[in-house]
Image (tube, grey):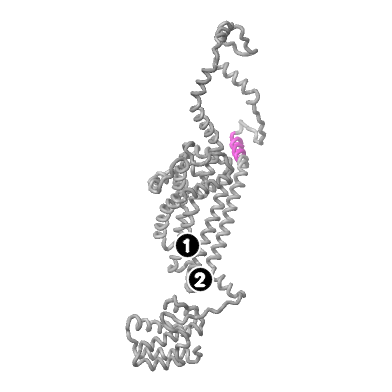
Amino acid sequence: MRLTEANLAIRPRSAWEALDLGTLLARRHAGVLMLSWATLTLPVFGLLSLLFWQQPTLALLLFWWLKPLYERLPLHILSLAVFGDAPDLRQSLRALPGLLRPQWLASLTWRRFSSTRSFDLPVLQLEGLSGQARHQRLSALGQRDRSAARWLTVVGMHLEGALWLGLLALLYFFLPTQLVQSWSWQDLLGLDSDWLWLEHLSNLLYVLVLIVWEPIYVACGFSLYLNRRTLLEAWDLELAFRRLRAQLLTTLPALLLGLCLLSPSQPGWAANAATTPADQYQAPAGARPLESPLTRDLARQQISELLDQPPFSNRETVTRWRFAETPDDVEAGGLTRLLENLFRLTQFGQGRERLALLIETLLWSAFALLIVLLLWRRRDWLQAFGRRLPHPTRRRKVPPALLFGLEVAPESLPDDVAAEAERLWPTQPRQALGLLYRALLSRLLHDFQLPLNASHTEGEMLQAVRTLEHPELMHYAETLNRHWQNLAYGHQPLAEPRWNELCAGWRALFDGRPGR
């Protein structure tokens, strides 16, 4: 990293100011970050959805599990953009295989649920550390700003969920009302394979949320890492000294020339120095004579004496309980070491408290997501329950006058529909069957109050009739709809016995009811 080429102000910041800096970095390079993330993740999501089409939840879970690998590409772009020119999409994707290879198994297994993943990733990717060196480096960096990295992960989880639920609600508002009303409990529970496309569509909304949020998450973790290195390695002081050195290099020749011209010659100094006897120098008491050789033992003794004096001397007395050693009893010594090791476990109490806090946070998050998921799955029941509550007066929706290009207003129909249809049948069979079909649609709109509109199809009309739970009406509507489609679209004439059955069915269903 070339600090002189950094395109941001290198100075110590607080953790929250560093997070703001990460947000600004993500916004500055939003184009290449979002485009590279979408180019990488959308094909992976499409492949997983095709492989696990019957298990959409499994496809989304696998996509979510691979997030630590996706985050390496935005970090590569940001690291080059901060200390140089930002790479374009082609250059970023060309470096992707080398970015995914190092420690990929550890990132997807025991480090997958790390709450400081964005803060730890630069140590792995930019410094290339692993094993004990990585652990020591993270311990040094994590003395500060680690809690801010944890809060970044926790807040990010809730922000992802909130944005995803918002897009799901928007998708629900765009679904046709007739489609939502026809959902059954099997549909809501995801047991019907005909609705798998809707669950895959909701999974896609989560992928779109990550395109916006994940570059911000990686940039904030990277800014925390840069801020911590600025504090530890004094990057701001190094830059100040480099600027001072550059200024001095430009003015130093002129300054030296001026000093040489202005300084008077004083030859008496050299004479005084030459006439000064060497034996006039008096060494301090206890010091080693200048003519005596310095040996290794003497140097070690003098160093030990110097370290025993302040400010180097810093002694500390630590008291702890331990079992007395019994050299004669070997078995007792083994038991003693075992118990001492058990007592040392109490030193990890603080770590257990942090782990308990993390587990508690995850459990509350899972509980909140479970409640939201339950409400989403039971939204049809909630909508049905809400209809029983008192509502303000609403204007009654006026039924349409045309359906499927046919006039369905009661005023356009004769008083005796069956008799008029029988009169038209010998000479005009198409008009006769169309009259029965128009009359059926008019009855469904005005007598049964079905919410049909001009955008509905014949199939959606039959689904709406199915909700009335009227077997005779459902059978008649299916029969009449089938014969009407055969005649209107297939030009297949209707046999005389079938026509008589339609007229008889009409009289059985509607002759005893008012027409309007």
Q: Where is residue 410 in the image (x, y as percent from the top left)?
A: 48, 87
Q: Position of residue 436 (x, y in %)?
A: 42, 87
Q: Residue 78 carries which label?
A: none
| Mark 1 neighbour density, 10 Å: few (under 14) some (14–19) many (20 or more) | some
In this view, 418 is above or below 467? below
Front in this rendered view, residue 363 or 2 = 2
Reply yes or no: does residue 332 show up in magenta.
yes
The image quadrant of residue 265 is top right
Q: Mark 1 points at which residue?
A: 202
> What residue sits 38% from the left and 91% below the top?
500
Q: Distance between the residues labelled 1 and 2?
A: 18 Å
Callout 1: SS: helix
Front in this rendered view, residue 507 or 340 = 507
Query: Which is the main secondary structure of the residues drawn in magenta?
Result: helix
Nearest to N terminus: mark 1 or mark 2: 2
Q: Mark 1: which amino acid?
A: Ser
> What residue sits 60% from the left and 21% below the top?
304
Q: Position of residue 440 (x, y in %)?
A: 45, 85
Q: Which mark is residue 185?
A: 2
Front in this rendered view, residue 260 or 88 = 260
- Provide the residue span drawn in magenta: 330-341
Q: Mark 2: which amino acid?
A: Trp
Callout 2: SS: helix
Reply yes or no: does residue 113 show up in magenta.
no
Please indicate, yes or no, whether residue 395 appears anywhere in the rendered image.
yes
Please indicate, yes or no, whether residue 183 appears anywhere in the rendered image.
no
> What residue sits 58% from the left and 51% below the top?
359
Left or right of residue 199, residue 11 in this image: right
> What residue sits 55% from the left and 44% below the top?
18
